[in-house]
């Protein structure tokens, strides 16, 4: 599980480095060069880093549960497996193959970004009330964390699926600043660290 968190940190660092690149380009270029898309890309990469972390935590945590290292949750016990995975398990294949591959395949079309989807994934590996525990860890009401994460994911979707265009102001994108991108990455980092801490 620690490997998944370390990979998250590396992924988030890449998003932060893009901000450093934007700052450097901004210092040597005129204002005629628009660097705001680099900040938009930071938000997309930040949310992607969180999404990947939750995918990996669910997969690795379920393998730990199958091995008896981690408590089996109700969601874990209800997780359905295809017969080929069952046959591989019976044949003695390692958990990483029959369960890890199945989890990866079943989750491949899902995104774990919105608070409820993140909590749903974590229920596969932990019985905790995720957002209450994260709120306690961060000293922030769970409701506020979920609202903030929803707003971040909504902005990520505007960038990724709508070119960040403002429909109320045709021809213009929603405003963004370096500070907004940095604040988003900082929040994602805190939330991810808290999720890792409360589920470890």
Image: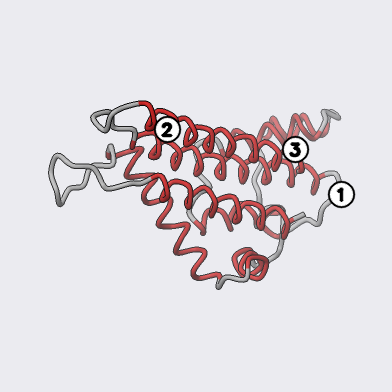
Q: Position of residue 113 (x, y in %)?
A: 50, 49
How packed is label 3: few (under 14 Cα within 10 Å), some, or many (20 or more)?
few
Q: Is mark 2 on a helix, strand or loop?
A: helix
Between 105 and 17, the one lying in front of the other is 17
Task: Give the total of numbered labels.
Answer: 3
Residue displayed at 73% across by 56% down: 197
| Vertical arrangement, residue 180 with respect to residue 17, above or below | below
**Mark 2 touching mark 1, by CB under 8 A?**
no
Q: Position of residue 86 (x, y in %)?
A: 74, 35
How packed is label 1: few (under 14 Cα within 10 Å), some, or many (20 or more)?
few
Query: What residue is pinned by disc 3?
Result: 3
Question: CA–CA distance between discs 2 and 1?
Answer: 47 Å
Residue displayed at 66% across by 67% down: 133
Left or right: 150, with 96 as reference point: left
Residue displayed at 64% across by 67% down: 129
Disc 2 or 1, which lies upstream in sequence? 2
Name the outermost residue toward the left. Answer: 170
The label shown at residue 22 is 2
Residue displayed at 55% across by 73% down: 141
Disc 3 or 1, which lies upstream in sequence? 3
Left or right: 53, with 38 as reference point: right
The label shown at residue 10 is none
Left or right: 63, with 157 as reference point: right
Of the 4 image quadrants, the one containing the N terminus is top right
**Mark 3 touching mark 1, by CB under 8 A?**
no
How packed is label 2: few (under 14 Cα within 10 Å), some, or many (20 or more)?
some
Q: Is mark 1 on a helix, strand or loop?
A: loop
Left or right: 69, with 8 as reference point: right
Between 161 and 43, the one lying in front of the other is 43
Q: Which of marks 3 and 2 is in front?
A: 2
Question: CA–CA distance between discs 3 and 2?
Answer: 29 Å
Query: What residue is pinned by disc 1?
Result: 68
């Amino acid at each position: 599980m620690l490997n998944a968190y370390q990979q998250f940190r590396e992924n988030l660092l890449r998003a932060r480095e893009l901000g450093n690149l934007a700052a450097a380009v901004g210092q040597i270029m005129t204002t005629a060069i628009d660097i705001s898309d680099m900040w938009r890309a930071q938000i997309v990469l930040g949310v992607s880093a969180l999404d990947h972390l939750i995918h990996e935590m669910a997969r690795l945590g379920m393998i730990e549960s199958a091995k008896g290292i981690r408590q089996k949750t109700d969601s874990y016990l209800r997780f359905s497996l295809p017969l080929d995975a069952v046959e591989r398990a019976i044949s003695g294949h390692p958990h990483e193959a029959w369960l890890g591959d199945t989890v990866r395949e079943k989750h491949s079309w899902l995104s774990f970004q919105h608070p409820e989807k993140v909590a749903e994934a974590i229920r596969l590996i932990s019985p905790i009330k995720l957002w209450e525990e994260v709120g306690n860890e961060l000293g922030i009401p769970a409701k506020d964390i979920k609202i903030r994460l929803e707003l971040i994911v909504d902005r990520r979707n505007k960038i990724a699926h709508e070119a960040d265009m403002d429909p109320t102001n045709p021809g213009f994108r929603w405003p963004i600043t370096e500070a907004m991108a940095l604040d988003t990455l900082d929040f994602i980092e805190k939330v991810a660290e808290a999720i890792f801490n409360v589920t470890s």
